[in-house]
């Protein structure tokens, strides 16, 4: 007979923790029993508030994701829970279908982190789990049997078709006729459905650089190689836009007609404006052009991570009709139902990559995307990170910086040491007297130290980040 295990004990010994969005760890840590422990603890937590007998499950294209999904499914069968397996699809497609069916969901994905790592994202029947849910999952004492045999999973295509329909059904005519859209497919979980959406809307689609190997694209720290690719593709195919996503398809990467990637918060600003959103919830790291543009009645700043953005929606909905949010990484969260073309677009309070690109194309229907960007207040952001940088070391640097911010500014090599304001909402965000901003924080998903900068020119923001990260190595 298989050995009995306790979920909290298994998780405590695993080394896998919750980050800004979901549980993340090395593939070697995410064993079948660890995946099982997360799954049964999640279900027990959900059963305290919801009634259901089925859970939705999907994966990204990482080599380890399918076996992890098998482990999740096997564990849930022990609890007499049925599984509907949607295969490789974007996270928002899974979340949307599960919300319509009023059931919980588990997404096996590590998002943008390298393929030697992976993770699990959990969804309540009404959307993403909260930070309170995360804590409960870690501490739940749920018994389950050690896993030995993993069954094959049969793919159901319903979530794919419903996600495509969510956007194509909003339009009665092929309004993208004449538009040339490049889709950088790499190993994105949505690569087999994105072209279908844009072709259905009339666009001429160019499917670019599909990869059999997993490509860890980080929409907040785009590589120089990917920057050059978009510029070259735009010239080669005379594109109006290049569209891509991170690994699980909840964070977009979008270019203008020249192949210049838009920052995620600029994309979010333009998309929210096109959607007529009244009140926004955005992380503290987002571009201050959001407020300076005066396009929104209210902007609420939060810690970084979609659970924090979502947590503000219920309060905003009490005062405003249309509510939304986005992150610096580009993921757009629709916090209320909205009307688009006289049709109802239901809320989807989780990061989505497709909605913002569609809204950008609507906003740019009679003008260039670059012109839309240039019409905004000219505040430029740049971000990068030091990989394989121990979280403890990041926290120590930030702790010292909070105590003596002027010393930190000098250590980072910034020209101005005069400080205007300090924000410790998430990490350490320092606004200087010249309105330049430098922001340090440990990544919530991997051992990385992230650095964000904002300035009146892109070159200044870029220089500040590169200089700061170089000097941090010396601290």
Image (tube, grey):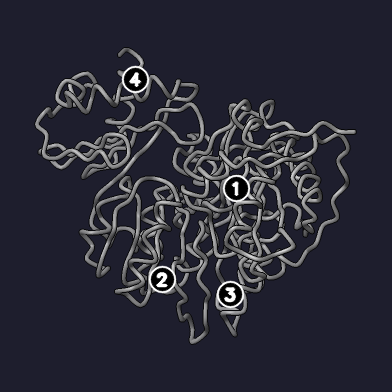
Vertical arrangement, residue 227 with respect to residue 407, above or below: below
Horizontal side of 120 relative to 359 (left or right) equals: right
- What is the secondary structure assignment of the residue under circle 3? loop
Q: Disc 4 marks which residue?
A: 470
Circles 3 and 1, Cβ within 8 Å, touching? The answer is: no
Q: Check whether the beta carbons of the residues at disc 4 and disc 1 lie within 8 A of each other.
A: no
Residue position for label 3: 177
Residue 470 image offset from top left, x and y in percent: 34, 20
Marks 2 and 4, how far apart at CA: 39 Å
Front of the two marks 3 and 4: 4
Dot 3 or dot 4, earlier in sequence: 3
Residue indicated by mark 2: 363
Which comes before the other along the chain, label 2 or label 3? 3
Determine if residue 48 is in view: yes
Circle 1 sits in a helix, a strand or a loop, which is it? Answer: strand
Distance between the alpha carbons at the discs numbered 2 and 3: 15 Å
Pair 4/1: label in front: 1
Residue drawn at x 49%, y 87% as measured from the top left: 342
Q: Which residue appears at 77% of the width and 41% of the height?
A: 71
> Looking at the image, is mark 1 or mark 2 earlier in the sequence?
1
Q: Is residue 420 left or right of residue 199?
A: left
Judging by the rendered image, the residue that carries numbered circle 1 is 121
């Amino acid at each position: 007979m298989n050995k009995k295990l306790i979920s909290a004990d298994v998780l405590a010994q695993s080394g896998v923790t919750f980050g800004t969005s979901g549980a993340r760890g090395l593939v070697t840590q995410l064993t079948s029993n660890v995946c099982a422990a997360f799954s049964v603890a999640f279900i027990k937590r959900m059963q305290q508030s919801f009634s259901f007998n089925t859970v939705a499950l999907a994966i990204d294209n990482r080599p380890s994701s399918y076996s992890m999904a098998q482990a999740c499914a096997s564990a849930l069968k022990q609890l007499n829970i049925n599984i509907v397996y949607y295969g490789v699809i974007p996270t928002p497609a899974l979340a949307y279908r599960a919300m319509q069916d009023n059931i919980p969901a588990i997404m096996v994905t590590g998002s943008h982190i390298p393929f030697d790592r992976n993770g699990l994202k959990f969804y309540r029947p009404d959307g993403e789990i909260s930070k309170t849910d995360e804590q409960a999952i870690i501490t739940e004492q749920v018994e389950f049997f050690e896993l030995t045999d993993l069954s094959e999973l049969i793919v159901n295509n319903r979530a794919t078709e419903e996600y495509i329909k969510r956007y194509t059904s909003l339009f009665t005519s092929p309004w993208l006729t004449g538009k040339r859209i490049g889709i950088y497919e790499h190993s994105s979980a949505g690569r087999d459905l994105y072209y279908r959406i844009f072709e259905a809307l009339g666009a001429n689609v160019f499917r670019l650089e599909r990869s059999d190997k997993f490509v860890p694209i980080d929409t907040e720290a785009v590589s120089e190689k990917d920057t050059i690719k978009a510029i070259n593709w735009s010239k080669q195919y005379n594109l109006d836009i290049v569209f891509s996503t991170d690994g699980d398809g909840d964070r977009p990467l979008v270019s203008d007609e020249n192949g210049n990637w838009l920052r995620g918060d600029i994309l979010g600003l333009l998309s929210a404006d096109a959607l007529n959103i009244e009140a926004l919830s955005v992380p503290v790291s987002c571009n201050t052009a959001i407020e300076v543009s005066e396009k929104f009645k209210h902007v609420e700043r939060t810690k970084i991570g979609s659970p924090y953005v979502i947590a503000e929606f219920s309060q905003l909905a009490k005062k405003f009709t249309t509510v939304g949010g986005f992150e610096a990484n580009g993921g757009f969260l629709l916090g209320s139902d909205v009307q688009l073309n006289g049709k109802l677009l239901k809320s989807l309070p989780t990061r989505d990559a497709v909605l913002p690109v569609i809204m950008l194309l609507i906003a740019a229907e009679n003008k260039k995307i670059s012109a839309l960007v240039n019409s905004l207040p000219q505040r430029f952001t740049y971000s990068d990170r030091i990989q394989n940088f121990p979280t403890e070391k990041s926290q120590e640097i930030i702790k010292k910086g909070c105590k003596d911010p002027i010393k930190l500014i000098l250590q980072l090599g910034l020209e101005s040491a005069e400080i205007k304001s300090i924000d410790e909402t998430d990490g350490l965000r320092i606004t200087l007297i010249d309105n330049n901003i430098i922001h340090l924080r440990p990544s919530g998903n991997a051992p990385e130290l992230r650095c964000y900068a904002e300035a009146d020119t892109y070159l200044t923001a870029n220089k500040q980040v590169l200089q700061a990260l170089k000097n941090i190595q010396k601290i």
